[in-house]
């Protein structure tokens, strides 16, 4: 009986642990990295894309916030290509019934904002940026998630090319801050400053 009770409590704590990060009032803060490529040949390519994001959970499993992105591609003789963007993002975490691994969650992410891709040579596109795709987060601790995201990104607007699109696989590192803990830390820092 004692063993059954202990197992039941442990199971309950595991379920609560996997859900506590994505509760209403919490904050998501982190970044995704994509297109990492560093050629070791002389005059080789360098590719890098960084997408920092900050979102607030308006309800359980639903976060809204903002993102910034910056991409750089350099190649000897071809110059530099720069991608940029800023806008709003939304994320919805799916139910636990389709999880592959314990302490993980599938999610859908979408974004809309002002984005551009500006190669030194070739067609540029600047305008409305749209993105959507599925992702998977593995919670490595109570407040930290390691994630993978497969996202379609498109830009519709003006420039030498009216549209631009790509499919991007990125990995990310997100911190989930419970609002109560964040509030306490802010109050402590204010008390120290007074």
Image (cartoon, grey):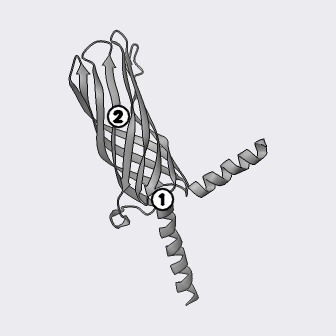
Quarter residue 2 falls in: bottom right
Single out the residue that lies furthest toward the bottom: 1
Q: Report the residue at 47% width, 63% height from top.
A: 19
Q: Which residue is mark 1?
A: 24
Q: Earlier in the sequence, mark 1 or mark 2?
A: 1
| Camera sees residue 49 | no
x, y percent for residue 83: 36, 24
Against 77, residue 130 (above or below) is below
Counting labels gives: 2
Against 99, residue 151 (above or below) is above
Q: Which residue is mark 2?
A: 113
Name the quarter where the C terminus is drawn: top right
Q: Report the residue at 55% width, 56% height from top.
A: 141
Against 165, residue 106 (above or below) is below
Between residues 176 and 145, which one lies in front from this camera angle?
Answer: 176
SS category of the residue bearing label 1: loop
SS category of the residue bearing label 2: strand
x, y percent for residue 12: 50, 74
x, y percent for residue 136: 38, 52
Name the quarter where the N terminus is drawn: bottom right
User: Would residue 17 appear left or right of 72 to someone viewing this image?
Assistant: right
The label on residue 108 is none
Q: Residues within 10 Å of mark 1 (few under 14, many from 20)?
A: some
User: Would residue 58 appear left or right of 153 to someone viewing this image?
Assistant: right
Single out the residue that lies furthest toward the front: 194
């Amino acid at each position: 009986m004692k063993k059954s009770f202990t197992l039941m409590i442990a199971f309950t704590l595991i379920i609560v642990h996997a859900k506590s990060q994505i509760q209403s009032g919490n904050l998501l803060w982190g970044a995704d990295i994509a297109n990492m490529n560093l050629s070791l040949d002389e005059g080789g390519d360098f590719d890098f894309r960084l997408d920092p994001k900050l979102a607030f959970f308006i309800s359980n499993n639903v976060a809204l916030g903002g993102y910034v992105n910056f991409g750089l591609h350099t190649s000897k003789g071809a110059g530099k290509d720069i991608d940029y963007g800023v806008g709003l993002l939304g994320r919805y975490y799916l139910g636990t019934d389709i999880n592959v691994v314990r302490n993980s969650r599938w999610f859908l992410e979408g974004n809309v904002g002002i984005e551009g891709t500006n190669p030194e040579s070739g067609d540029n596109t600047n305008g409305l940026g749209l993105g959507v795709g599925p992702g998977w987060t593995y919670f490595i601790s109570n407040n930290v998630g390691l994630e993978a995201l497969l996202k379609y990104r498109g830009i519709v607007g003006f420039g030498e090319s009216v549209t631009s699109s790509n499919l991007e696989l990125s990995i990310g590192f997100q911190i989930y801050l419970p609002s109560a803990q964040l509030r306490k830390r802010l109050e402590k820092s204010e008390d120290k400053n007074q």
